[in-house]
Image: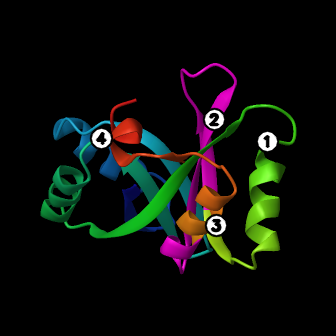
Amino acid sequence: MKIKQLSIFLQNRMGSLAKPLEVLTVANVNIRAMCMADTSEFGILRLVVDDPEKGKEALEENNFLVKITEIIGVEMNDTPGGLTTVLDIIKDNLIDLEYLYAFTHDKAGKAILLLHSDDIDKLIDVLTKNNITIVSADEVYNL
């Protein structure tokens, strides 16, 4: 149920995003979703890839600082208000999200929302009790 996400710490300078992506290409690791957050001095590149362990190993061999973090994916309607429906459930249950990002996939009318919270198990429990479909890690890795 939990998805392994790679968090890669990068210096905030021109071209720094290209190198880790090249490393993953050479290692034949496919990116399924990505999110970039930055400050004036550094950035955190968050990636969901088809083989997290292989991706982490390849990046570390090329001197990147990489952390594996657990996130979850939920299926939501790919319509106006689809995201709001999920976020309202989270808010109403007083769960604090640290970040999220989403992507569409081949299921008609559906998107996948990736979520991170300091209490992933509570998040899973609340969403499941509210009939939100939790997407398996294998489904995301093998899209």
User: What's under tag 1, amino acid-wise?
Assistant: Gly
Q: Of all residues shown, which one is farthest toward the right?
A: 80
Mark 1 residue crowding within 10 angstroms, few (<14) / some (14–19) / many (20+): some
Mark 2 residue crowding within 10 angstroms, few (<14) / some (14–19) / many (20+): many
Q: Which residue is mark 4?
A: 50
For residue 85, above or below residue 129: above
Mark 3 residue crowding within 10 angstroms, few (<14) / some (14–19) / many (20+): some
**N-term mark: 3 or 2:** 2
User: What's under tag 4, amino acid-wise?
Assistant: Asp
Q: Which residue is mark 1?
A: 82
Q: Which residue is mark 2?
A: 111
Q: For the residues marked 3 and 2, what is the alpha-carbon distance in whole angstroms?
A: 19 Å
Q: Nearer the viewer, residue 17 or 6?
A: 6
Q: Position of residue 81 (x, y in %)?
A: 86, 42
User: What's under tag 3, amino acid-wise?
Assistant: Val
Residue 87's quadrant in the figure? bottom right
Asked whether residue 132 is in view, the answer is yes
Q: Which mark is residue 126?
A: 3
Q: Position of residue 100 (x, y in %)?
A: 62, 59
Q: Nearer the viewer, residue 106 or 39?
A: 106
Asked whether residue 42 is in view, the answer is no
Q: For the residues marked 1 and 2, what is the alpha-carbon distance in whole angstroms?
A: 9 Å
Please name which of the two marks, 4 or 1, marks the residue nearer to the observer: 1
Q: Residue at x 38, y 69 (%)?
A: 69
User: What's under tag 2, amino acid-wise?
Assistant: Ala
Quick check: marks 3 and 4 in contact, CB under 8 Å?
no
Does the magenta portion include 121?
yes
